[in-house]
Image (cartoon, rainbow, N blue to C red):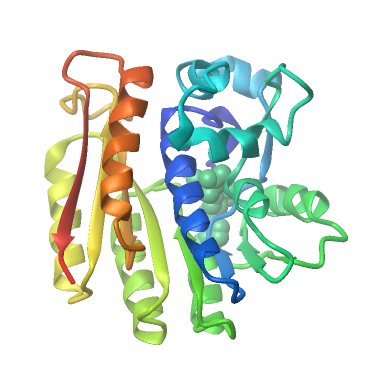
Amino acid sequence: MNYRHIFHAGNFADVFKHVVLSLLLKSLHKKETPFCYLDTHAGASRYDLSSAAAQKTGEYRDGIKRLWNNSSIPEVADYLAAVRALNDADSLRYYPGSPRVARFFLRPQDRAVLFELQPEECTHLKNEFAGDRQVLVQGQDGYAGLKALLPPKERRGLVLIDPPYESDKEFEQVIDGLRIAHARWDTGMYALWYPIKGRPPVERFHRMLVATGIRKILLAEFSPYPEDSGFRLNGCGMVVINPAWKLDETLQSVSSILLERLRQHPAARAAVTWLVPE
Ligand SMILES: C[S@@+](CC[C@H](N)C(=O)[O-])C[C@H]1O[C@@H](n2cnc3c(N)ncnc32)[C@H](O)[C@@H]1O
């Protein structure tokens, strides 16, 4: 487990993932009944963009930095409000990880359970939410955690699965985790992040998803770079299972707007498609 998210915090992939996450959580506000948010790979939750690690890669400059002063995009206003909630006035210093973004959308009746296996990251996470009675942090494997907790007592909510993909095996692990989770709770909403380095591994992953037999699978893909270099992160995708009604249309328009702000090349692309319909 060498992965540290601080090197990538606030990059284009984080922005896309967290904008989608914000939209999914917002869709859960349509009903007053409580929901539960489960984050299998939570990370540290708050990232200092002025730190040596973040400055070393500078990835946030082609991500959140490009959007920060652009409050004229109504579709990303809630997401930007979640980022602003961590910062003073107009200066961008801290970037929220998925748990902090999600916390912004919890109402008093909602709760979150966060899993983080890496001890140091988990300590940061525990400190971040110390005393917060709506948030439970667990220093354990996120897939095992899902198995133990699903279905949540609220019977409404969202599971985010966002592993580091340090090895190619992670694609198989994600599919196994999803299959087990869905068998326990098939009405929950699921969001699963995946990297796009080239098309062949992504198409293989899509075939594995179809083979699970799970229905209502939406794909939102976002690639600011051409997808032909296997050595860098060219783009990323979010698998969304059981999205709210019309979320496909919203994601389509938001992705196009984000692509205009974050594109790195004329061959950049964003696409929202149903992999498996209802
Ligand atoms: C991509 S980062 C998470 C980023 C976070 N979800 C966000 O959007 O801000 C992946 C995290 O998963 C943690 N991790 C790796 N394997 C894990 C496992 N089996 N269970 C729980 N956490 C794990 C890593 O330590 C790392 O902090």
Picture residue at 60% right of the left edge, 72% below the top: 32
> From the viewer's perspective, is 57 left or right of 202?
right
Q: Give the x, y percent position of residue 191.
A: 39, 58
Counting from the top left corner in percent of width and height, residue 43 is at 61, 48
Left/right of residue 41 with respect to residue 179 in the rendered view: right
User: Residue 186 at what x, y percent from top left?
Assistant: 35, 81
Q: Nearer the viewer, residue 212 or 176?
A: 212
**Side of 212 where 127 appears, left or right:** right
Q: How many marks?
A: 0
Q: Quadrant of residue 81?
A: top right
Residue at the right extreme?
A: 131
- State which quarter of the image contains the C terminus: bottom left
Question: Nearest the camera: 26 or 52?
Answer: 26
Q: Is residue 66 above or below residue 236?
A: above
Q: Residue at the spot x=34%, y=62% of the render?
A: 243
Considering only vertical position in the picture, is 83 above or below 28? above
* Picture quadrant where residue 24 is located: bottom left
Determine the image quadrant of residue 9: top right
- Residue located at (11% from left, 43% from top): 200
- In this orientation, does residue 1 appear? no
The one nearer the camera, 48 or 201, is: 48
